[in-house]
Amino acid sequence: MEDVNNTIRFLKGDSSDIHSALIEKMEASAEELDFEKAVFYRDQLSMLREVQAKQAVYTVQGEADVIAIASQAGMTCVNVLTVRGGRVLGGKNYFPDVDSSEPLADNLSAFITSFYFQVTDDLPPEIMLSHELPDQVAVSEALASHFGSKVVIKTSVREHRAEWLDLAKLNTNNALKTKLGDYLELHARFGALKDVLADVTDRTIDRIECFDISHTMGEATIGSCVVFDQGGSRRRDYRQYAIHDIVGGDDYAAMKQVLTRRYKKQPLPDLLLIDGGKGQLGIAKEVLTELGILGDTLLISVAKGEGRKAGLEVLHFIDHEPLDLPMDSKALHLLMHIRDEAHRFAITAHRKKRDKRRSSSVLEVIPGLGEKRRRDLLNHFGGLQQLLGASQQELAGVQGIGPVLAKTVYKVLHE
């Protein structure tokens, strides 16, 4: 009932008391050493601030279509967001049959031509795109001629229009993740992988674990492990490993530490996937040999091919010649998807660790920003990561900060 009442108050615009109550609960939980509950309230604060920040989307004027494109693991998605009278009326996802190895801008140009000439008869005065088209002027002139009205195509937008474009991009990426996780598609990709590996192993491939290393010039090194089976990603089994006592930037030493720490305690999967070339494969072989479990899994490393271009990956094995799969291979798409997820998981944890380390020290030396104001800022936005993403105007809206101090904080954090 408390959640229901808070929701009603929020929808009526009364969110300040809710915000204060969440801060009190978070701090009380932390003082009681109930950190899991404190994190829960911190995340609620973060979501509350995010929703409040997005409310500007519904309070401005504008007639536009906002179109974003993204591609991942051989699949391309386009999201068309419809804005009329300054309100986002909704959006729709499309999965065009295009060559995902082609530049996104080229595929977006082809989609726009098809969409406006064949799918819809509604042309707004403004179209915002996630990528600049190679033939943008020609497309604009063709649309104006076909519909008999002028249209402006933009890729560089600010303020509320930038929020619309960010929303379209978010929708596109979410739709891709959902589509890639679809059971039937996933089942087909596992079947394709089994066929591809028939000459390499007779092992049944169900559980796959993939590792990646992330750091910035050797700083805040993180190793990630993601887990997939034929039901999709197993997020509860994901793990992140903080790397210690190595020379900064030594990816081989980092990978050796992560694999050793995991498989001293955990059983091996059916397929162990390493992001990297022959060097990383050699490190994995060395670790599993030392642990006496090399024969308990199929070990594969996936390396970028010529020009490190997506879709040209090469699979390396211990006792088999490398495999160079075609770009339309469902087996390759599965491994690329798992590899990309490991990379995303690693880089997210790395950035959080790096930014926490940097921001903690930076906040302490900002003139006029005492302990209470530092705590108020962090509580207001729900954490350091969210604080780094705040605009100068949002900083100024925090009680006790004001526009002058907000300008100083923003400048220190970002410049």
Image (cartoon, rainbow, N blue to C red):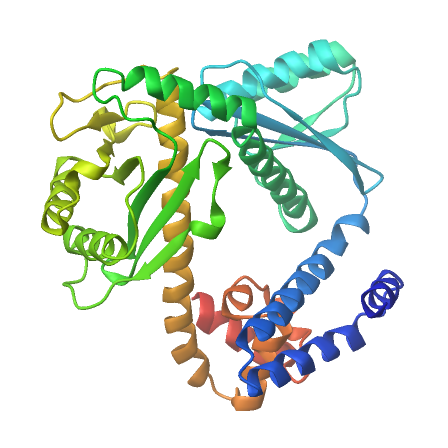
Left or right of 86 on screen, residue 141: left
Residue 102 in sight from this viewpoint: no
Please tell me in which quadrant of the rendered image residue 248 appears: bottom left
Give how far across and how far down residue 227 sits, in percent.
Answer: 40, 43
- Is residue 257 toward the left or the right of residue 20 in the image? left
Q: Nearer the viewer, residue 187 or 29?
A: 187
Taking the image as drawn, is residue 307 in sight?
yes
Q: Give the number of marks.
A: 0
Across and down, in percent, residue 26 comes to: 63, 78
Give me the residue at 47% from left, 44% from top. 234
The C terminus sits in image quarter = bottom left
- Give the quadrant of the N terminus: bottom right
Q: Residue at x 60, y 73 (%)?
A: 37
Q: In which quarter of the image is residue 309?
A: top left
x and y percentages locating residue 57 in the rendered image: 75, 49
Is 45 drawn above or below residue 142 in the view shown?
below
Q: In this view, does 349 lie to the left or right of 187?
A: left
Judge by depth and name the residue closer to the eye, 152 or 98. 98
Relative side of 365 to 170, left or right: left
The x, y position of residue 149, in whole percent, is 78, 19
Q: Residue at x 57, y 89 (%)?
A: 372
